[in-house]
Amino acid sequence: MTPITNVMQKVIIFERNIKLSKVSTHMHLQVVPIDKEVPDEECYNVFENDARNVLGDQIEVRRFAPEVDLQSAIIEAGFAESQYLLAEMPDGGKIIHEIPEHFIKQTLAMGRRPCSVLLNAPEREDWRSCALSVDEEKKLTASFKTNFKPLDFTN
């Protein structure tokens, strides 16, 4: 990887929010670089199709415009107290759908699976296949720091 000008210029950010108990929630955000040539509409379609393939055609997948903030999208969709997958697309729009309780085990790869399709890297669907050695992680970290130094406002 060379300086920041050659870095993929689009990202998808997704959040999978799963209730583990009445008082515990597992939530994580992932930021995935997407090739700048991938059309934004394709990103939406791949996420929507994945939701319907896993959860069934009856699942309601909602889209929100870029100007709608994430919290508002969650509340407006009625998922503030629900399990859901929310993805922010490269154009800033959002897509959100509920994850029904009985689908929790089937949804562990939700978010990763459509990103692996968009990256044309099906092996990346399972996070375990993405593990690197300690040396590889150190090299990747050093490369990341070098490439993104122009954006580091702390120095």
Image (spheres, helix red, strand yellow):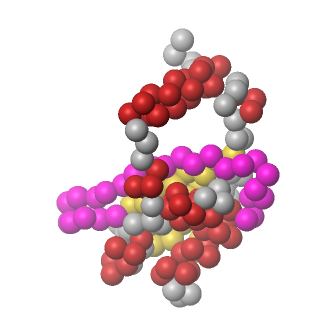
Q: Residue at x 21, y 66 (%)?
A: 21
**Foreground residue among 143 and 9:** 143
Q: Is residue 91 visible?
A: yes
Horizontal side of residue 1 vs 26, given as left or right: right
Say whether residue 111 is visible: no
Task: Pick the quarter of the image with the C terminus.
Answer: top right
Q: In this view, does 150 lie above or below 36?
A: above
- Who's the residue at 53% across and 65% down the image? 113
Q: In this view, does 40 lie to the left or right of 30?
A: right
How far from the left and from the top, in percent, is residue 70?
A: 53, 53
What residue is at 78 percent from the left and 58 percent from the top? 39
Relative to 147, say whether 47 is above or below. Answer: below
- Name the spot of residue 121 as percent of width and height, x first: 61, 58
What residue range appears in magenta? 18-42
What is the x, y in percent for residue 78? 46, 70
Left of 39 or right of it: where is 140? left
Between 136 and 114, the one lying in front of the other is 136
Write the residue at 67% across / 65% down: 44
Residue 106 sits above or below residue 150 on the image: below
- Picture quadrant of residue 143: top right
The part of the image, by quadrant, that contains residue 3 is top right
Magenta-colored stretch includes residue 146: no
For this view, does 65 lie left or right of residue 123? Answer: right
- Where residue 150 appears, x then y in whole percent? 65, 19
